[in-house]
Amino acid sequence: MNKFVFLVIVASVSACGVIKDRSTEYAQAEYGKPLIVPESLSDSKIRSVFPIPSVGSDREVADSFELPRPPNGTAALSKEPFSVESVGGQMWLRLETSPGKVWPLLDLFWEEYGIDVLSEEISQGFVTAYTANLDSELKAKITEHQPEAPIITEATFQASLVQGVRRNTAELQLRVLDSNQTKQVDLAKLVAPQNPKVEQAILSLIGEFVTSEDLQNRYSLLANDIGGDARVRLMKTQSGDSFIELDLSFQRAWSELGKALKSAGVLVSDIDLSQKSYFISYLNEESITKWYRTSDQSDEKSKERNYRLLLEQSDDKVFIRVKRLNEALDIETGLELLNIVFEHIS
């Protein structure tokens, strides 16, 4: 028995040298001639189960395409539940919640102060309301917030609610018109600001009302689509160049980019509005030593112009592109900068 086992082991070991390793031969394989099936027979047995359709050469390829968004795990960039902001003569209420939650609470605000809704387009986030005699309590609160605001009794309101620039946020613009102003404008669309001090005061009051702890469990499915697509998108051209596309005015885009860079801790060496550019030194203070591993003073290194964030305007869109100014730095770091901006601006 021991002799038999010994012979089996010897045969097995020697077989390793006899059997040839063919694991890489596929790389030298040549294409054979296609199999031709006579017309009288069926080729169903050899036909691919999941065939790849042919693509016509005349198909137009888009100049650019949107990159997939990351999982929606963005934390609120502001500690405050709301704020009234203004850029370029436009004012809005920013809320750290979705339009679907704001809309029903806006309806409650009108009801709270006896303001009648004349018309509303929920999908557009647009509402027109009216009161012949402004509530005395609301008047007092307006004066409390804005002592210099004019006294308005008969008033027509326009409110436009849209998706905010950042994820899970909403923006509300408001117009307050007295009886004379109402006759001079088209109420079917949002007009220019008429009484900015009153409008600012009421926006603050709406912000306080909407974010009240007693009203946090309301939601409107009808208002879920207000605002449509994202207003900030990370795009890439067919040649592989990445850029950020914003559905904003230039002034608003310029302001949002500045806030995003500040929030991200990116070191900005200079700002030049005439060149529509933010000049970037480093992604952050740690990267000063990470990129060059230098012992030079941080304040000197932070003045370097390593990258340029250029804003370009076309019709109603603004594009942010990154330009490398220091050839010693790799292109990937520039792409990282663009991703950081996108994450903090959207």
Image (tube, rainbow, N blue to C red):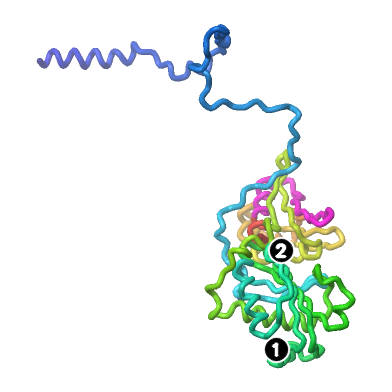
Which mark is drawn over residue 124? 2
- Observer-nearest residue: 31 or 137? 137
Q: Position of residue 195 (x, y in %)?
A: 82, 81
Q: Quadrant of residue 171?
A: bottom right
Q: Are marks 2 and 1 in contact (CB under 8 Å)?
A: no
Q: Is residue 329 magenta?
A: yes
Observer-nearest of 60 and 246: 60
Name the element at disc 2: helix
User: Residue visible at 61% across and 70% down?
Assistant: 96
Q: Position of residue 302 (x, y in %)?
A: 71, 61
Please tell me in which quadrant of the rendered image residue 137 appears: bottom right
Looking at numbered disc 1 in the image, what kind of residue is underneath it?
A: Leu
How far is the residue under mark 2 from the one under mark 1?
Answer: 27 Å
Q: Is residue 114 visible in the rendered structure shown here?
A: yes
Q: Is residue 329 left or right of residue 182?
A: left
User: For mark 1, what is the residue?
Assistant: 138
Q: What is the magenta range?
A: 310-339
Q: Is residue 266 visible to the viewer in this orientation of the structure?
A: no
Q: Within the image, what quadrant is residue 152 found in?
A: bottom right
Give the residue drawn at x 85%, y 71%: 186
Check residue 346 in the rendering and tell me which mark sits there, or answer none: none
Q: Residue at x 68, y 51 (%)?
A: 234
Please tell me which of labels 2 and 1 falls first in the chain.
2
